[in-house]
Image: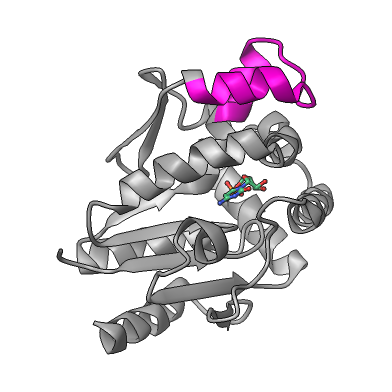
Amino acid sequence: KNGIQVAIDGPASAGKSTVAKLVAKRFKYVYCDTGAMYRVVTLAALEKGIAPDDTDQISRLAQQISISFAPGDPEQQVFLDGREVTTAIRQAEIDQNVSAVAAIPAVRREMTNQQRTIASQGGIVMDGRDIGTTVLPDAPVKIFMVATAYERARRRYVENKAKGIATASLADLQKEIELRDQKDSSRKVSPLVQAPDAVRLDTTDLTIDQVVDRISVIIKKTL
Ligand code: C5P
């Protein structure tokens, strides 16, 4: 097989997907945004009028829908049953409900299975919350990316504006991010936690290029 598994985990808006995409490009690896998958399940549930706490119906839904990715510019496109939902899954309503959906054990089981299948192809950079701990526990490179809540909210604010997504105020974004981290860290199944063998990377004062470079050095040492 050509290429290794690179697991990038961390709290919301720590810059994981931006960096993971660039690292994947540099090494010609596949990139997989696992957060987008939980977002698609959440969107499907909301569209069907299923309440985020209806675990039975959402568990069934997660098994029925098809989630897929395709290369796109400027970002990777995401599809729900063949329909493009790249922007739809970034709405505030999804931010507010995704942690509840992602806490459902059967949803996690289904997503984890699909993610392992995607990763079995070869060189992969996968970002999320539980990649190093649960999805790919044998990944030779594990990064745990962190940054202050203020800096993460600031980045999300700038990103939303650039993408033309209706955005809350900076203060409200920070509150939403902190609440989501708290939910993700305290759930029973695969909570957000640093794997013991992960390298912790505080990106608060680093540029995107600096973070990509540091991770690239770690990968090259491992190859
Ligand atoms: O990465 P992103 O912020 O898009 O993830 C959205 C949500 O999906 C997270 O807040 C978390 O609840 C869930 N998630 C997860 N496990 C992952 C990736 C995301 O539970 N591996």
Q: Is residue 163 visible?
A: no
Location of the C terminus (image quadrant): bottom left
Q: Is residue 108 above or below residue 123?
A: above
Residue 220 placement: quadrant: bottom left
Q: Position of residue 207 (x, y in %)?
A: 49, 76
**For residue 153, side relative to residue 165 (left or right):** right
Q: Name the foreground residue: 123 vs 78.
A: 123
The question of residue 177 being in magenta is answered with no
Which residue does the image show at 54% across and 59% down from the upper left?
A: 134
Residue 188 drawn at (x, y percent): 77, 51
Q: Is residue 4 left or right of residue 63?
A: left
Query: In the drawing, does residue 84 fall left or right of residue 70?
Result: right
Residue 13 visible here: yes
The residue lying at 66 percent from left, 61 percent from top is 11
Q: Nearer the viewer, residue 59 or 201?
A: 59
In the image, residue 42 lies at what x, y percent? 63, 28
Q: Tell me the quadrant of the picture where the N terminus can be found.
A: bottom left
Name the one closer to the observer, 25 or 2.
2
Q: Give whichever of 1, 169 is nearer the camera.
A: 1
208 left or right, relative to 101: left
Q: Is residue 193 above or below residue 167?
A: below
Residue 196 percent coordinates (x, y): 60, 80
Span colored in magenta: 41-63
